[in-house]
Amino acid sequence: MKMKKTLTLLLACAMAVSMASCGSSSSAGETSSGKEESSSGEAAKAATPKLDGYELLWSDEFDGDKLNEDIWSYDPHEPGWTNNELQEYTTSTDNVFVKDGVLTLKALKTDKNGKDYYTSGKVKSQGKKDFTYGKVTVSAKVPQGQGLWPAIWMMPTDEQHYGQWPKCGEIDIMEVLGNDTKTAYGTVHYGEPHAQQQKDYKLVVGSFAEKFHEYSVEWEPGEMRWYIDGNEYLKVNDWFTAVDGEDEKPYPAPFDQQFFVQLNLAVGGDWPGNPDSTTNFDKAQFEIDYVRVYQKPSYDKNVKKPEVEMRKALEDGNFIYNGDFKEAEDLTDDKNWKFLLFNEGEGSAKIENGEIVITSKKEGTEEYSVQLVQPELPMIKGKKYKVTFEAYAEKPRDMIVCVSAPTAGWIRYLKDTKLSLTTEKKQFTYEFEVTAKTDPNGRLEFNMGKCGSTETIHITNVRVEEIK
């Protein structure tokens, strides 16, 4: 949340994870519902449930009539404080209030000096309820609307302990973009250089704006796990931190120090974009039913970082699997090739006759709006690589190719390169050298959005090989 890249970078990394059971069910020992109504019609005080294997560290069920300042502090900031966001975070009860058992962070659109001006709410537990390791569970309902950006996230109490962001680490329990409330994101940031791991969770039915859902993270010395409504969708155990050019700090740094919880509703910014005429600020409110933090009685802190597993090249030296498209495969899963659509891009892909054929209906608003990728390419510092493929279009058009680093700050090993396709099949060849940190998760991308055309593209004989 603190220093996000643009939507281009963040969403390009997302490997869409559609879960078959995405309702309001919760894991054993938890509830995803909040307050019950008493016979008098008033909200009854909710009992914080026990959780097997954990002890309750602290919680807020928001049963009072104002913010509990023994737990939370207001966190005011001027517009543009981070991510080019538009809102001013205030201490006003118009933006932050507790009512009927729910904490509400409300965004307001006003006028200042003849221009649109936005205020909103942000609260944090820093200095009051800091902790190291545990399970954080939050029940919340997000707002819908272009430019709205609710978040549940964690930062270290002492941001300077390992150095300023991203070296200090950041745990994003939940983020939702108001223009796509069927999708929630879990992310962890660390580095330097800046690295991140992220996955999304998509609802098959309904949206995160329609009712309360439960978001949680289990943070342990050697692993973090993200859940929505009790369903695990992201696991991370291979983070690091360092000052650029120096040795890494001992694992599990930076996630071996005290962190605190933050809740906020941003307006605009690099990732969601700004509000437009469709954004209804009468309903621009982020509602939180409860925040519960549990800890195990003890944690084994004697952990080691998992050894990095690098993809092996095929017998012919190719790191691309199914590069000749002789095998049929599911283009929506995380194995080998994956076809992705974002930001108004519309289209389809199919493998036939030793080619992959990409048919676009709408090119979308971004270059990555129509995208074909293959991840998990080993990018080893000091090595040189060659990318080759054959491609053509049914009518002349452009396409962009690159090799990116979705978990290493979205740097480019092979820079974004625009190429012109004709109706005749042509071989394209590019070489590059890896000068950054060794990365097991390089990604070959073919970006076909926002190129001024929706003409069908054919690609085959794709290779990425080490040449030195």
Image (cartoon, rainbow, N blue to C red):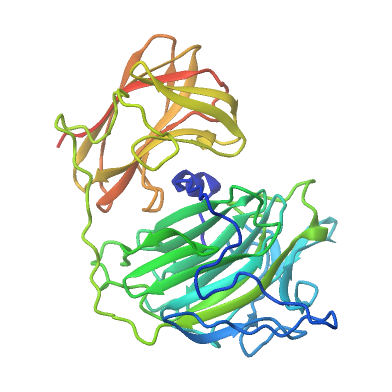
Q: Is residue 450 visible?
A: no
Q: Nearer the viewer, residue 323 or 363?
A: 323
* Residue farthest front in this picture: 39
Q: Position of residue 271 (x, y in %)?
A: 58, 51
Q: Position of residue 459 (x, y in %)?
A: 38, 21
Q: Quadrant of the C terminus?
A: top left
Q: Nearer the viewer, residue 360 or 212?
A: 212
Q: Nearer the viewer, residue 421 or 80?
A: 421
Q: Residue at x 54, y 47 (%)?
A: 7
* Residue 457 falls left or right of residue 355: right
Q: Quadrant of the N terminus?
A: bottom right
Q: Is residue 338 visible?
A: yes
User: 333 above or below 392?
Assistant: below
Give the image quarter of residue 240: bottom left
User: 65 above or below 231?
Assistant: below
Q: Position of residue 303 (x, y in %)?
A: 25, 74
Q: Residue at x 61, y 69 (%)?
A: 32
